[in-house]
Amino acid sequence: MRERTVSEAIAYRRSVRIFRKDVEIDTQKVKTCIENAALAATSSNLQLWEFYHVTDAETLEKMTKACLGQNAARTAKQLVVIVVRKDLWRKRAKANVNFLKELFNGKPEAVSEKRKKQSLDYYRKVIPSIYTDFLGILGWIKLFVFTIIGFFRPIYRQVRRSDMRIVAHKSAGLAAGNFMNSMAAIDYDTCPMEGSDTIRVKNILGLPWSAEINMVIACGVRDEKGIYGPRFRVPFDEVYKKI
């Protein structure tokens, strides 16, 4: 079968609850789809995510229990766990700085000194000012200051620790979308699962306490009974607002 176009893949993708037992999926092809996930848009290019590709039979069994025994996990051939790593913001910011330095050194005349400084200062000063916090206290102080400034000019307002968690999870969600549509393009199916014991999932994967589970995605090839019903969407006119 030819690989589907983007629109075709999006239309084909469904949340599949039961996968075929007699059809295996290629681990390398799934890995390629995870590579596509890592190309997703991400806030400030911080890429505060990790992708755990579970193929080991014993680990799959443990994960099934952690996913509350639901059919999608129980019949999945492989699992992909999208993990949010907001705690790695310093490391990822430094990686961006190193990348920019190398880029600027390779093209010394292509970028103005002002642009170089702005780019580097963003990761050296702006990102730390937003992500640094202490027991949530600094976040409320920053919110108060930014709110006052906001009376006089537009300003970024998502500065609390809870806000930055949301930002990181949004980026991870974009990556998950890339992954599932990539799988659909090659005739593989998925089911994103939020129903899981995230503490047990983290223990199974050996994750630190600061990591957060965005979602567990079951992977396989759909069984004829794997989709529980026709697709339902509210009328598009209800959600589309042209201004």
Image: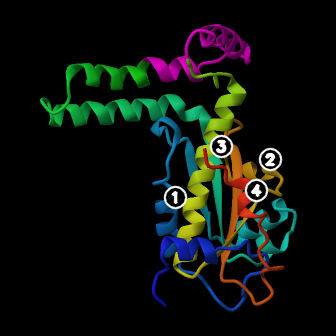
> For the residue marked with disc 2, what is the amino acid?
Ile
> For the residue marked with disc 1, what is the amino acid?
Ala
**Residue 204 can be seen, yes or no:** no
Question: In which quadrant of the rendered view does residue 110 lie?
Answer: top left
Q: Main secondary structure of the magenta part?
A: helix
- Residue at screen point 68% across, 64% down: 217
Magenta stretch, residue numbers? 125-153
Which comes sooner in the sequence, label 2 or label 3? 3
Give the labeled residue for mark 2.
199
Which class describes the residues within 10 Å of circle 3: few (<14), some (14-19), or many (20+)? many
State whether residue 133 is above or below residue 109: above
Q: Nearer the viewer, residue 96 or 156?
A: 156
Give the Cα distance between marks 1 and 3: 14 Å
Whether the residues at callouts 1 and 4 have beta carbons within 8 Å, the answer is no
Left or right side of 38 for 113 = left
- Residue at screen point 83% across, 53% down: 197
User: The residue tagged with tag 3: helix, strand or loop?
Assistant: helix
Numbered circle sitting on residue 37: 1
Left or right side of 196 for 121 = left
Give the labeled residue for mark 4.
238
State whether residue 29 is above or below residue 214: below
- Residue found at the very far left of the displayed protein: 109
Give the labeled residue for mark 3.
169
- Residue found at the very far front of the displayed protein: 243
Quarter in which the C terminus is drawn = top right
